[in-house]
Amino acid sequence: MEITEHVQVGARRVAVRVGGNAGADRTVLLLHPAPGSSAFDPDPSATTARGVRLLSLDRPGYGGSDPHDGPVTVVSAAADAAAVIDRYADGPVGVAGWSAGGRVALALAAKRPEVAGRVAILGTPAPQEEVPWVPERVAAVLEGLRGLPPGPWRRRPRN
């Protein structure tokens, strides 16, 4: 059974999805790609069968989590992840970060090594500022998206 709860981090609420095997000895925190949300377990029945309790949180401004007042950084997202682990686990947990979630997983392991037992990063690109890999035309489109307000996305008709 899967439930969604909220963890209070300062004045913000962070949405946490708890799934898998509730009585499991092992806990794994899954950090979703961007865009994405905590509803990202690709095979919930396999997770349960493996005896894993899966925690996944919505990063700031995604899904059911409140946005940050200021800019969101990898380190601030890692602090949210640490707060979730502190709330749900008594010791270190496995951490899996997919795509952009991989950066958060690495920051979590660097800043709070006592809560990240093992870390797996999947399909995580290198930071653009360190290893430029995004084509200039794509970077220009991404930059244009930064100023858009949060809200429902609508598909524009093609001409």
Image (spheres, rainbow, N blue to C red):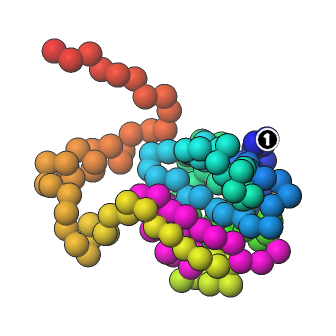
Q: Tell me what residue is drawn at x 78 percent, y 53 percent.
A: 21
Taking depth in this image into account, of 53 and 86 the one nearest to the observer is: 53
Q: Does residue 12 appear in this view?
A: no
Total marks placed:
1
Residue 30 among those drawn in magenta:
no
**Does residue 146 lie above or below 116 as drawn?**
above
Q: Tell me what residue is drawn at x 15 percent, y 55 percent.
A: 135
Q: Residues within 10 Å of mark 1 (few under 14, many from 20)?
A: few
Quadrant assignment, res 99: bottom left
**Does residue 1 lie above or below 115 as drawn?**
above
Q: Tell me residue 152's x, y (percent).
A: 49, 28
Q: Is 97 on the left-hand or right-hand side of 82?
A: left
Q: Is 55 on the left-hand or right-hand side of 3?
A: left
Point out the image quarter for the C terminus: top left
Taking depth in this image into account, of 119 and 128 the one nearest to the observer is: 119
Q: Tell me residue 70's x, y (percent).
A: 53, 60
Q: Which residues are magenta?
A: 90-109
Question: SS for tag 1?
Answer: loop
Q: Is 3 on the left-hand or right-hand side of 112?
A: right
Q: Tell me residue 92's x, y (percent).
A: 71, 77
Q: Does residue 19 appear in this view?
A: yes
Quadrant assignment, res 11: bottom right
Point out the image quarter for the N terminus: top right
Q: Tell me residue 28's x, y (percent).
A: 66, 63
Residue type at mark 1 is Met
Quadrant assignment, res 124: bottom left
Q: Which residue is mark 1?
A: 1
Residue 94 among those drawn in magenta:
yes
**Does residue 28 lie above or below 130 as drawn?**
above
Q: Residue furthest front?
A: 49
